Image (cartoon, rainbow, N blue to C red):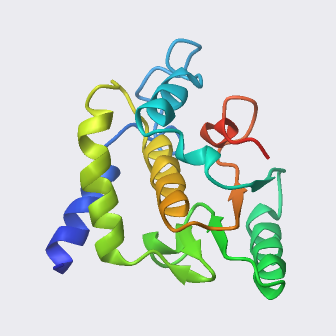
């Protein structure tokens, strides 16, 4: 895969609604709920149910705590997925398995598979898309555990479709 395909993939993902960066889109009960995320998971075959998960929430230290929990699971011999946000250096670090960033080629392939599915779900957000990509990646990679860091938090966070 070329750098152009990877760059295009990121551009397309980030072209969607991102409530963490803008307020120009309605942010109300009609648009900010879990209905779209549940529908997306159903259309994808519920990948979030393919692995046990540990859900990390809070106001400070979520990323560090998530990384430590993932490290403990790996040290115990478990194949471990880690989903965090935002990224510090590269987008691929948000989706890790046993410490390894998702390969560019895999990210591109998952995105190409996800695009026609989200076409049926208007106003899918960037975070919902990235969360779905993480769940797809972890399910297909047969992780033993996934450590999932919440995004915006609260009861309507897109990560709340998991059963921790």
Residue, far top: 30
**Image height of 99 relative to 11, above or below:** below
Q: Residue at x 49, y 19 (%)?
A: 31
Residue nearest the viewer, comparing 10 with 162: 162
Left or right: where does residue 110 sit relative to residue 98? left
Say which residue appears at 56% left-offset and 23% top-offset. 32
Taking the image as shown, residue 151 lies to the left or right of residue 122, namely right
Q: Where, by quadrant of the figure, is residue 80 drawn?
A: bottom right
Q: Nearer the viewer, residue 4 or 18?
A: 4
Residue 123 against residue 62 in the figure, above or below: above
Q: Position of residue 58 (x, y in %)?
A: 84, 50
Towards the viewer: 99 or 8: 99
The picture places residue 81, in percent across and down from the top left corner, at 63, 68
Q: Is residue 68 left or right of residue 48?
A: right
Q: Residue at x 52, y 12 (%)?
A: 30
Pinpoint residue 14: horizontal percent, then vertical percent: 35, 51
Q: Position of residue 108 (x, y in %)?
A: 28, 65
Q: Give the residue drawn at x 16%, y 79%.
A: 2
Q: Is residue 12 visible?
A: no
Is residue 1 in view from this perspective? Answer: yes
């Amino acid at each position: 895969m070329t750098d152009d395909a990877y760059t295009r993939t990121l551009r397309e993902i980030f072209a969607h609604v991102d409530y963490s960066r803008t307020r120009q889109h309605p942010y109300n009960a009609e648009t900010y709920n879990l209905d779209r995320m549940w529908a997306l998971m159903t259309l994808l075959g519920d990948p979030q149910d393919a692995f046990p998960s540990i859900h990390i929430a809070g106001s400070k230290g979520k990323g560090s705590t998530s990384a430590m929990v993932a490290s403990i699971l790996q040290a115990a011999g478990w194949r471990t997925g880690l989903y965090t946000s935002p990224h510090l250096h590269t987008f691929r670090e948000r989706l890790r398995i046993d410490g390894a960033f998702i390969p560019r080629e895999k990210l591109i392939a998952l995105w190409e598979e996800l695009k026609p599915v989200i076409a049926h779900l208007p106003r899918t957000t960037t975070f919902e898309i990235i969360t779905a990509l993480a769940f797809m990646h972890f399910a297909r990679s047969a992780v033993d555990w996934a450590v999932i860091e919440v995004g915006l938090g609260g009861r309507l966070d897109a990560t709340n479709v998991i059963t921790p």
